[in-house]
Image: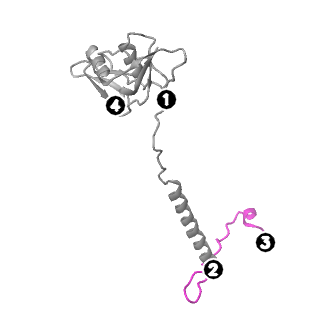
Amino acid sequence: MLPAFLTGKKEPPPARTAPPLAPDGSLPASERGMLIFVATLLGVGTLAKATSSAVPVASPTPTPPEPSPAPSPTPSPTRSPVPPKPSPKRSPSPTSTFLGILTARDLSTFCAANHAGRVAQHSDRSWYCKSTSGHPSLPFTSTDICRWRYDDKAAWAVAGDIDDPTTWKCYM
C-alpha cells in the first residue's frame, strides 16, 4: 500500500481519544503535574512582580538636577516665553569676587523694574514674574537677578537652595 501523498487520496483523520479518567474521576498524573507546574509559575511570577515594583525609599534630601546655564529670554508679546532652567550650582573660583547675597526683595524689585508683575515660582521650581496686566510673564534665573542687581553682565549666581532666594550668592 502506498502513502496518501503519493496516491493523491486523503487519509481519514485519526480518531482522537481523551485520556482515560481514573475510576474516582480524578485527573491523570501527567495532567495533575502540569497543573501544579502552571500554578507554581503563576505564584513565582506574581511574587517577582510584587517585589520588583515595590516603592523605592526616598533619600532624605533630594538634590535637583544641575542643568546647563541658559541666557534669559527677552519677553515678546507675540509669543509665550519658555520657562528658563534653574541656574546651576557653581563653586566660586579662587579668582572670583563675591558681590553679595540676594534677598526676596531683590526679586520683587526686579519684577517691578521690568513692569512684569509679581514674583512667582512654577511647580518645576523655576522662577518668573507673573504679569498682572496684559504683559507676558517674565521668566528669570538666579544669575539674571545677580546681573540685574549688580549691573554686571559677568555676574553669576550660586544658589544654595533654588527655592530660597536668601541663599543665592552673587559672584563676578
Residue picked out by circle 1: 66
Q: Nearer the viewer, mark 1 or mark 4?
A: 1
Give residue 158's quadrant in the image.
Answer: top left
Q: Residue at x 58, y 84 (%)?
A: 21
Amino acid type for the residue under numbered disc 2: Ala
Crowdedness near tag 2: few (<14), some (14–19) or many (≥20) residues, C-alpha within 10 Å: few
On residue 165, the disc is none
Residue 10 in magenta? yes
Q: Earlier in the sequence, mark 1 or mark 2?
A: 2
Q: CA distance from mark 3 to mark 1?
A: 83 Å
Q: CA distance from mark 2 to mark 3?
A: 39 Å
SS under mark 3: loop
| Residues shaded magenta | 1-27
Q: Nearer the viewer, mark 3 or mark 1?
A: 1
Residue picked out by circle 2: 29
Q: Quadrant of the N terminus?
A: bottom right
Q: CA distance from mark 1 to mark 2?
A: 63 Å
Residue picked out by circle 3: 1
Q: Is residue 137 in view?
A: no
Relative horizontal placement of residue 146, taking residue 118 as reference (left or right): right
The reply to whether dot 2 and dot 4 touch (C-beta < 8 Å) is no
Q: Residue at the left extreme? A: 133
Amino acid type for the residue under numbered disc 1: Glu
Amino acid type for the residue under numbered disc 3: Met
Give residue 147's quadrant in the image.
Answer: top left
Q: Main secondary structure of the magenta part?
A: loop
The foreground one among 77 and 168 is 168
Amino acid type for the residue under numbered disc 4: His
Q: Earlier in the sequence, mark 2 or mark 4?
A: 2
The foreground one among 132 and 100 is 100
* Vertical position of residue 64 compared to residue 90: above or below: below
